[in-house]
Amino acid sequence: MAWDNGGAADSSARERLRSTFDCAAGRYQQARPEYPPRLYDELVTAAGLGPADRLLEVGCATGKATLPLARRGLRITALEIGSGLAAAAARNLAAFPAVEVVNADFETWQPPPGDPFDLVFAATAWHWLDPATRYQRAWALLRPGGHLAIWGQAHVFPDGGDPFFREIQAVYDEIGEGVPPDTICSRPGEVPDSRADIEASGLFGDVVVRQFDWEVSYDADGYIGLLDTFSGHIAMADRMRDRLYAEIRRRLSLRPDGLLRRHWGSVLHVARRLDGPGPPS
């Protein structure tokens, strides 16, 4: 649980866990790290975006990835299933009249009449969508030649990285929240990508993949605030979470600077919508 954002393997778990984020609406914007500015540069270049283009964001949360694109003058419709998160996003994006936040589910939302979108994008949200329909849905909402962009955030483990995370696993094991023995700890630049999955849809091609990594230092309050935005930690029983957080505070209090270093990795995918008959009806 210490190393990921709480992805879900089956549909029932996915629905249950993705609904937990709304209770973190007050913490999400400050606690979650910013994506690297160069990621947005690569996105704009790969998708050929210009100021007049229309973007549809899937799962905007509090607008973490929306804001950098809004500052570039792009027109964005941002969908968010959580009412609290959507309200926070609307406040954070109030200065941008070209951005509309809609409290709606991507799978069932119906766009108003008008031109299709130039880009559909999802930042740390794509894995919460139904794998059986998400590519078809994005394809249907895009103009011919439009693009799909997906990326996320993962914990990566460089050589010489902070040993804190491996050491704290003993506490996760104690409370019954340990990671499976076959868990892969990716190195920076080696996070698994989704090129094959995108191409297998038959709806998108010319996939551009770019890897990014960066480091953030946290004190105990900052790191616990981050964990409180992860679905798996939100869903923990109180006694388990209290035990874990107390041990995090104790261990960091023994460090001279009271800090830990967490390395993040992100894989940007930008794929072009293929022409043709499209998804089956």
Image (spheres, rainbow, N blue to C red):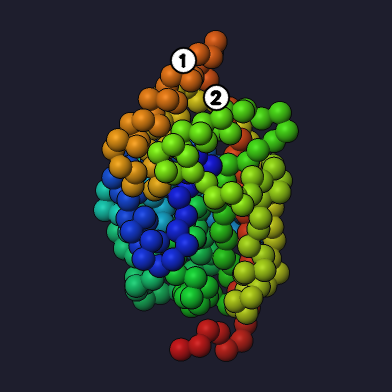
Disc 1 marks a residue whose amino acid type is: Ser
- 57 or 212, which lies in front? 212
**What residue do we see at 42% from left, 25% from top?**
247
Disc 2 marks a residue whose amino acid type is: Leu
Name the mark nearer the viewer: 2 or 1: 1
Relative horizontal placement of residue 233, taking residue 184 as reference (left or right): left
- Sooner in the amino-acid sequence: mark 2 or mark 1: 1
Is residue 90 among what the camera can see? no
Dot 2 falls on a residue whose secondary structure is: strand
Report which quarter residue 113 is drawn in: bottom left
- 31 or 78, which lies in front? 31
Q: How crowded is mark 1: few (under 14 residues within 10 Å), some or many (20 or more)?
A: some
Q: Position of residue 228 (x, y in %)?
A: 37, 38
Q: Name the residue under label 2.
A: 260
Dot 1 falls on a residue whose secondary structure is: helix
Q: Mark 1 points at which residue?
A: 253
Q: Position of residue 218 (x, y in %)?
A: 50, 25
Separation (CA) of disc 2 from disc 1:
11 Å
Report which quarter residue 230 is drawn in: top left
Q: Residues within 10 Å of mark 2 (few under 14, many from 20)?
A: many
Q: Position of residue 145 (x, y in %)?
A: 61, 74
